[in-house]
Image: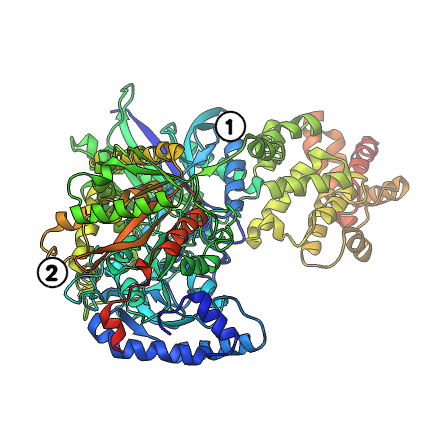
Amino acid sequence: MFEQSIATLAQQLRNKEISSVELTRLFLQRIQALDPQLNSFITVSDELALQQAKAADLAIANGDSSSLTGIPIAHKDLFCTQGTLTTCGSKMLNNFVPPYESTVTQRLQQAGAVMLGKTNMDEFAMGSSNENSHFGAVKNPWDVNKVPGGSSGGSAAAVAAGLTVAATGTDTGGSIRQPASFCGITGLKPTYGRISRFGMIAYASSLDQGGPMAKSAEDCAHLMQAMAGFDDKDSTSSETPKEDYLANLNAPLAGLKIGLPKEYFGEGLDAKVADTIMAAVKEFEKLGATVKEVSLPNLQLSIPAYYVIAPSEASSNLSRFDGVRFGHRCDDPKDLLDMYTRSRAEGFGTEVQKRIMVGTYALSEGYYDAYYLKAQKIRRLIKEDFVNALNEVDVIMGPVAPTTAFELGSKTNDPVAMYLEDIYTLSVNLAGIPAMSVPAGFVDNMPVGLQIMGNYFAEAKLLNIAHQYQQNTDWHLQTPTMAKGA
Amino acid sequence: MNWEVVIGLEIHTQLSTKSKLFSGAAVGFGAEPNTQTTLVDLGMPGALPVFNKEALRMAVMFGHAVNAEIGMTSVFARKNYFYPDLPKGYQTSQMDHPIVGKGYLDVTLDDGTTTRVGITRAHLEEDAGKSLHEDFQGMTGIDLNRSSTPLLEIVSEPDIRSAKEAVAYVKMIHSIVTYLGICDGNMAEGSMRCDINLSLRPKGQQEYGTRTEIKNVNSFRFIEKAIYTEIERQADILEDGGRIIQETRLYDPEKNETRSMRSKEDANDYRYFPCPDLLPVVLTQEYVDQIKANLPELPNQKAARFQSEYKLSEYDAQVLSASRSMAEYFEVANKVNQDPKLTANWVMGELSKLLNQSQLEITQSPVTANAFGELLARIKDNTINGKTAKDVLQAMWQGEGSADEIIDAKGLKQVTDTAAIESMIQSILDANSAQVEQYRAAEPDKQKKMIGFFVGQVMKASQGKANPSIVNPILAKMLKG
């Protein structure tokens, strides 16, 4: 049951073969049984979930349902959920119960989805291994000694282990795609502006984008139907009309032009991962696609540019956590300065503090031009690279990450190695284009994700391509052994 | 030494939009703390700003009114600093690309001379909240009602050379923003606040001296006094061979002194950068042109029209047009009595005096412009004289009715019947034969002075109702005998 697709479950719910309450109970039991090994949830909202499930059953009985009605899902713990603890993986917000609902969770709720709970994440979405959480590291369901990737590691692990049908995630530099790759699930980072950021606790506003994480492209498409679209509460939200993400899933791929950027297959890429990606590309050729090499010459610059822009924005975005109105406040502050410094020193973890300091430095008088402005110039170059490449081909394919999931603790003392994890994903956020991670095989029993990058607002196209691939492969149907244990 | 003062002003003008700059919360003064706030004004995690287009329209109106370049692409930037009443830890403002660029204003001084003050820029920004230090037992209360209230910060060039010029400039800005209807101009409630940048240099020297900035001065009178005080302070230091420290100072109106708030060394590095939550504001030429076409008549234009249309003096025209509400009052009253000079004198004189005494704005006058015009019409048609009119106005002020009703009820109509006046004069002459003898014996020069006595007696006898323009010639004739 836990391995079923959204479409199948929706059918079963409509046919009254199962009720949403039963389905919800099943997943709540799975969380209770298996999550102690994974730590993928920060909050499990049993009562609310069962309430919502009852309401969904009623809606289904009244014939008033969508494909998401009664489907249990989970939300990354940075989407504000009214009345439900929202921590952002931080001690700073370990007592924060939002008085309002984010647009993404509201839209999914209105579509009838049931919220099982809030998933673990790297603190304030800063991290590539989900080891930077105040609530402890998340483990990879394929090997609990390995990381699930980050920062949406909780969502990825929960979906992979069958603790939820699907989940929301956010992607600032790869935070949907890299954990999706490491956990063997399907994740989509939409075009910047496609999904409202209202109610999503900001890390780097010009890069953050919410998106779906699920077992298949088709399931992602179901979530996109509800999540995507203009929101007048987010000024950076796009007025470009949203597409029907389900309508073209079955369009044939004959004639599809795939570009392989040579920079994605150079030094640093694990040879077995490279072989896996090339095998996937071959599969597309069988489906009628043609392949050519393209170039993204400024790829190497994406890491320094990202690590200036994202921390700069973060240093400002995180200023509101000052102990004045919400969140952590230190005990017995002597004066204002003491309250600020101790509240923030106690409330933020090391990685967050590091990025706040980097960002503060980069924006300082005398350094702004050399760092922030230069990073913005690089950002424009990277965007041009993608625009040029996507003039030649329909989509770009490559690895999501240079390796499969690594051992817990193996990179925590080597920040540069950790930052290099994101080399293939960061540039997509800098350019603002959409990209997916699609399960494409295994290396030493760990999943490998294929990255598919498309043009602005080409989400429906990406989902179509991934779906066609999944119709002809079964990588996305593999289940980790631990998931079968309950 | 002969010092020249150099002043540049930053005026924070609160725009009179219904809702805040980046949220739908109402803007208002005096509400219960934290009742006029939304998620955005509270700086809630995940809350996002949405730009109020009405504030944009108002800023563009102002730009046109001061002959300025309009920023066709303007960009919001974050000014980062920590303060408890700054909920996001940054103020959303504009830095490199303001909505209003270079412009200028021709300012008329009291002596009738005109000076041109350059305007560097005007940018949109949100206000912070308020810290309340009393009544919280050693703690500080935060009221975020004012948070995200829209401000237009108007920055002048250092073109101002005296306190008088500074006040005239601020009055002019005040008059423009109230004319445009983009600010209520209520300085007591903080709708206009002024930062004064001031330095001294020896007369004739080209480069500027070190300046200080006096923050948040909120009345015309305080601006003038703060400038005088600061000039004196700086001059004393310089005369003694000292150096001015670049710093921010506060003006204390009770002690009439400025004192140091923080020096340049303590100044924040605001780490400005473009706000990633807001898109650049891109205007079309059509939008900008349309606002220009619909601009109301501005103070200078109105003053010029008052001179040509009503033949008023430059001074009268300037005074009457300085405030939009006074100009409107004048025009309505004048329409009733059709005597611009009379109306101008009475609006600027008697009416202004009464308003001052009652501490009322002209818009709160208990006597409407129409009713006031009717009163003046009764002077013009000789129903009453000016002296009686003042009494009638008092009665109108107390709500006793219209001019005509009061004149009727109190029997104040002037006596214009020549025969009646002649007989009244005759009985006065009879009763004062000694004075009449003296008058007739006196030189013509002296007679002019002595006639006042008889006029007084006539007015007394008529209880002020005799029309002086009729009394005077008859009296002169009858005294001759």
Q: Quadrant of the N terminus of chain A?
A: bottom left
Check whether the beta carbons of the residues at disc 1 and disc 2 lie within 8 A of each other. Answer: no
Residue B9 drawn at (x, y percent): 38, 36
Q: Which mark is residue A409?
A: 2
Residue at image coords 19%, 57%: A405
From the viewer's side, name the closer residue of A34 and B53.
A34
Residue A267 drawn at (x, y percent): 15, 39
Q: Is residue B340 visible?
A: yes
From the viewer's side, name the closer residue of A91 and A331.
A91
Q: Which residue is mark 1?
A: B67
Q: Is residue B339 left or right of residue B127?
A: right
Question: Coloured how?
Answer: rainbow
**In the picture, residue A214 is in which quadrant?**
bottom left
Mark 2 crowdedness (10 Å alpha carbons): few <14, some 14-19, many ≥20: some
Mark 1 crowdedness (10 Å alpha carbons): few <14, some 14-19, many ≥20: some
Q: Give the amino acid at mark 1.
A: Asn
The secondary structure type at the circle numbered 2 is: loop
Q: Give the amino acid at mark 2.
A: Gly
Residue B267 drawn at (x, y percent): 22, 44
